[in-house]
Amino acid sequence: MEPSGLVGKAFAVYAKDLRLELRTKYAFNTIMMFGVTTLAVVSFSLGQSGLPPRLLAALFWIVVFFSAMAALAQVFTREEEAGTALALRLTADPNAVYLGKLLFNLTLLITLSVIITPLFFIFTDAATGNLLLFVMVLALGVLALCAATTLVAAIISKAAVKGALFAVLSFPILLLPLMLLVTASDSVLMGRGVSDILAPIQGLFAYTVVMVTASALLFKFVWKE
Amino acid sequence: MYALIAEDLGKQFGSRKVFSGISFELETGQSIAITGRNGTGKSTLLMLLLGIHHPTRGQARYARDNEYLDDRIIRARTSLVSPYLNLYDQLTGEENLAFFATLAGISLTGKKADELLARVGLEGRGVDRVGAYSSGMKQRLKYAVALLKDPAYLFLDEPSSNLDTDGKRLVHDLIEERRRESVVIIATNEEEEYSLADGTIRLGR
C-alpha cells in the first residue's frame, strides 16, 4: 500500500474527468454551443450600436451564466446516469471527489471564457478598458460560479428533472456574485482603475472563499445518499 | 481480524417495510448469503451494510481487533461487485484499474495490473476501452477492480450475472479463495452460490 494524499486523489478524479471529456467532448460541445449561440443572438440583435458599458457587462455575464448552467451540472449527472457514481462513492474520499469535480468545472469554464471573451469584444465592439483588470474580474467570476454550482450539481444529480432544478437552485445562490460581477465589469469597461472596483472584488473573493469552504464541509453529506 | 456487525437493521420506503430486525456478526474467514425473492431487499441490505443508504433503524459497524474502523479504512478495504456498479466505458481496462488504485491509495505496477487482468481472464484486453467489452467481460473487470484492494470485506450482488460457464467457475473459485481471507457477503438466489457461504439470511419470508 502506498498512501496517496488528498491532492493526489483529487487530481486523479480531475484527470479522469478530463480524459473522459477529451474522448467524448460532451460537456465542451454543450457549453460552447450554448455560449456561441447566445453570443451570436445578442450581437445580431443589438448590432454594434455602442451600448452602454453596464448593459454590455450584464450581457456578457448572462452569456457566461447560461453556458455554465448548460454544462456544469454534467460533472455529477454523468456519473449517476452511467452508474459509475457507486464505484466512486465506495472508493474515493468525498473531499477528493469535490475538489476534482471543482477543478474540472473550472477548466470547462476557463476554456469557455478564453473563447467567448475575445468574440464578445469583437461582436459588440465594446471598449476593452483595462484588459488585465477585466481578465482578473473574469477569473474571479469563473471561480465564484464554479464554487457555487459544483455543490448544487451534486445535489441535483439524482433528481428527475436535473436541468431545470440546477438552474432553479443555482439562481438565488448566483444572484449576488452576478450582480458584483456586472458592477465590476461595468467599471472596467468604463476604463476605471483598481480602486473603483475594490469593493465588488473583495465581495467576490469573500463569496468564493465562503462557498468553497461551505461546499467542502457539506459535500460528504450530499454525496453519501 | 476484521469484523462486520449488523445490529437490528431495518429499511422502510414510505409506508412499505422492506425488512427489519437483521442482526449478525461476521469475522474474517466467515461468509453469509442473503437470499430471497425479487424485491425483498437483497441489494438494499447490501447498500445499508456498505453505508451507501441509511437504514430506517439499526446500524452496521466495521471493526478490527475490537476497535471500530473509520470511513477511510473502510473505503480502502471494502469491495463490491454488483449489477448496479459500473466502470468507466470510455476508459480502458488498465485505466480503470489505475484510477481506482490511486483513489484507494494503492501503488499499481503494470505487472500487478496484468496479473489482476489475467486472474479474471482478461489477459491482453487491458488496453481496450471498457465500452467495447461484452457484458461478461465488464463483469470480470469489476472483479479485477474489487481484488485490487485486497478486500477485507467483499460484497457480491448476483456474482455470476452475465458470466458464461468459465466465468461462473472463476467466480466460485474466487469466492472459495476470498472467504478464507475476507468477510464475504453474497446476495444471490443461485443455489451454487449461496451454498458456498457459511450461513444464509432469507429475506421476505
Image (cartoon, coloured by chain):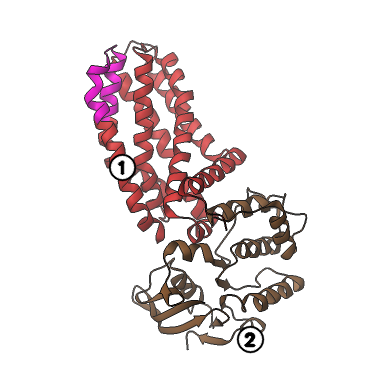
Say which of A168 and B57 sits in front: B57
SS for dot 2:
loop
Q: Which mark is residue B195?
A: 2
Residue under the point 42% across and 48% down: A98
Circle 2 residues within 10 Å: few <14, some 14–19, many ≥20: few
Which chain: red?
A
Residue under the point 48% across and 59% down: A89
Q: Position of residue B156 (x, y in %)?
A: 58, 72
Q: Main secondary structure of the magenta part?
A: helix
Quadrant housing residue B113: bottom right
Magenta region, residue range: A179-202
Q: Position of residue B53 (x, y in %)?
A: 41, 67
Q: Which mark is residue B103?
A: none
Question: Along the horizontal axis of the image, is B93 left or right of B9?
Answer: right
Circle 1 residues within 10 Å: few <14, some 14–19, many ≥20: many
Q: Position of residue B52 (x, y in %)?
A: 44, 65
Quadrant housing the N terminus of chain A: bottom right
Residue under the point 57% across and 77% down: B186
> Cα distance, mark 2 to mark 1?
52 Å
Q: Position of residue B128 (x, y in %)?
A: 72, 50
* Total labels drawn: 2
Identity, as a three-letter code, of the amino acid under mark 1: Met
Residue annotated with mark 1 = A211
